[in-house]
Structures are given as structure tokens and as C-alpha cells.
Image (cartoon, rainbow, N blue to C red):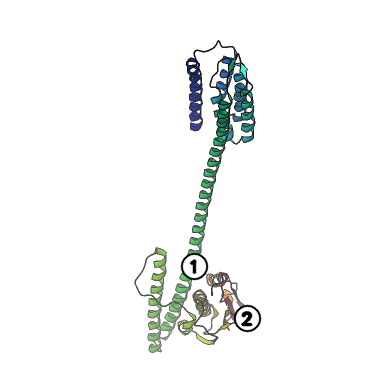
Amino acid sequence: MRRLAAGTVVSITVIVATLAGTIVLGLIRGGLPTPNALDFILPAIACGALLLRHRYPVAVLIIVSVAVAFYYPFARVDGLLIVLNFLALYTAADRGHLIAAIATGAASLLGMGLGESGGVRHVDDSLFMMIAGWVVAAIAFGGVTRNRRAYLHEAERRALEAEHGREEEARLRASEERLRIARELHDVLGHNISMINVQASAALHGLKKRPEDAESALRTIKETSKETLRELRTTLGVLRQVDEDAPTAPADSLARVESLVAGTGLEVRTELSGPLDGVPTEVDLAAARIIREALTNVSRHSGVGEARLTVTNESGHIVIRVEDDGPGATYTDGSGFGLRGMRERAAALGGTLEAGPRPEGGFRVVADLPLTQPNGVR
């Protein structure tokens, strides 16, 4: 609405300037000739139509062009009606009607060049060429403004799409980070608290009969709880995005399999095959977390105190196998957060994880982690 009002003001200004210029030009030339009816009708039609140029650009262009084409050969007052045609041509081209603007502009020029009327030579050759140049300029300027407006609109659209894409990417990254932190918290807290529970139960049972065993269990509880607090503080520091100077426990790694096994409270028969010290960091951490979670499940659910752990590095893959001889009935469905987290870790690295009961009894977890990631990083 604001743009239409501004366009109307421009139209009225051009109309007034055209009519005033016609009178002034006639006086300069020595007086206006005796007008005929077309001197009043054609300008009135052209000026009235020009007020509607934004709503009906092609219709207004045709009306104004026809009026101009008849005005110069047949009217007696040699006015500036051609200026109205320039504005109509610009508007049509600006609204995308380029072919109509070119056709009607050519018709207007043809009407202007027909010759004399009432003994008045309206345009000579040089003036005709100048007016023709203004017609071409009006059409070209209208096309330029339309292209610029389309370019700005497209740039705005792309900026909005880019902003929307950045927001979607940020939400996706935030979701992935929450899932990663949830897995870390589950692995750390679930494992350590489970060990605290196991050692506390052992201390209670051996407190009267074997106090030395109770003391050892309580010492293990103290160290495990201390490690849990350190790792929890580290994870919360990531959430708060602060740089903590406090010392943290070493990250889980295949190079420290013995410490992982020692903290489970199980008797674990461990077999290691192949080099395990040059494994990529993300694979190393994921493998250690899977081992810890699998052994925690054995301690928590199997009902036995023994397990077997096999880790091999061959053919570009880390293969982890954790087995026990317990019934494993409470976690054979694979719906717990621990098994889900292990599967997510393996899948994130392009690997696989299978968990389920063994045909001969017990439960088995087998993870296959490729050393070369899908993006080619090793």
C-alpha cells in the first residue's frame, strides 16, 4: 500500500510536469496554436490511465502509447505527452512485460515519425533519434530494476534458507552431543556405581568373618567413588563449556585393559592379540567403553563371578568378545540403555555389535570396530 501511494505521487508529479511543460513550451515558441478536440481528449486519457499503471501495467501502456501515437500527428498543440509514455514503458518493463513494452514503444515511435499536422513539424530527425534513445532507456531501466529486485529477493531467500540450515545443523549437533554425553554418563556412573554396590555387598558379608577382606572392599569403594566424582566433574565441565584446571582421571583405553578388568570385581580371563597401542583415539575409547559396559553387565546380571575377554587387532578391525557362563536372562532382550549405548558407539564408527545368549549357555557380546573410518581418517 505504501509503495502504491508513492507510485501514485510519482504519476501525478509527471502528469503535472508534462502539462505545465506543454504550456511553457508553447509560450516560448510564440504562443499556443488554436487547439482542437484531440488536444484535450488525448492528454486526459493518457493522464487518467497513468494513475493505474501499477495495477494494470500492460493496459495502461497500450492506452498511453495509442494516445501518444495519435497525439503528435493529429493534435495541434505540440506538447510533452511523450514523457507519459516513457513512464508507462518503464512500469511495464519493471513488472516483467518486456515484450509488450518493446512492441508499444516501437508503435509510439512510428506514430511520432509520420510527419506534420496543421503545418507543424513535430519532430525532426535529430529529435526523433533522441526520443528513440529515451524510449530504449526507459525500457532498459525498467528491466534493470526488475532484475535487481529479483536478485535481492533471491539473496534474501537464500539467506533465510542458510540461516534455517544453520539452525537445523546446530540442533542436530546439540542432539548428537546430548546422546554422546548420555552414553558417557551411563558408562562411567553405571559401571562405577555397580562396582561400589558389588564391593559394598562383599564388605557387608565379610565384615565379621574376614575383616581384612572388608577393609579391601571399602578401599576399593573409596577409590571407585573418587574416580566417579572426577569423571562426573569432567563431563559436567563439558556441559557448562568451561575450562577446568582440576586433574582428571585418564581416559579409558585398550592400553589399560588391565585396569578396566581389575575394577570390575570379576575374575576375567583376558586374551589380547595384535598391536593395541596405535589404535585411533575414537576407536580406542569406544572399544574401552564397550569392554567396561559388557563386563559391568556380566557383574550385574549374569550371577557369576567369571568372564572371558578377547581383544584382537587384525585385518584393519578391532574385534571384542566378552562371554560369561551365567543365565543372562535379565538382559537377553537387548533393550537396556547399556546395550543400546554399545550399539550406538559401534554404529557411529561404522562397526557392528551383536549381543545375545550363547547356545551352550551364558551371554556373549561381540563388537567389530573398523580402524579406518567412513571419512577415510585412520
What's the residue type where badge 2 is placed? Arg
Q: Name the image quarter holding residue 259.
A: bottom left
Q: Secondary structure at mark 1?
A: helix
Q: Residue at x 57, y 37 (%)?
A: 143
Q: Position of residue 319 (x, y in %)?
A: 58, 80
What's the residue type where badge 1 is placed? Arg
Q: Position of residue 206 (x, y in %)?
A: 42, 86
Q: Residue at x 41, y 74 (%)?
A: 228
- Disc number at residue 358? 2
Q: Residue at x 47, y 67 (%)?
A: 181
Q: Position of residue 2 (x, y in %)?
A: 48, 32
Work out which quarter of the rendered image holds the C terminus and state it. bottom right
Q: Residue furthest front?
A: 125
How many marks are shown on the rendered structure?
A: 2
In the rendered image, the vertical position of residue 245 relative to residue 360, given as above or below: above
Inspect this view and state whether residue 90 appears: no
The residue under label 1 is 180
Which label lies toward us, 1 or 2? 1
Q: Residues within 10 Å of mark 2 (few under 14, many from 20)?
A: some
Q: Residue furthest top?
A: 34
Work out whether mark 1 precedes mark 2 in sequence or the reverse, and give the earlier one.
1
Q: Residue at x 60, y 27 (%)?
A: 61
Q: Secondary structure at mark 2?
A: loop
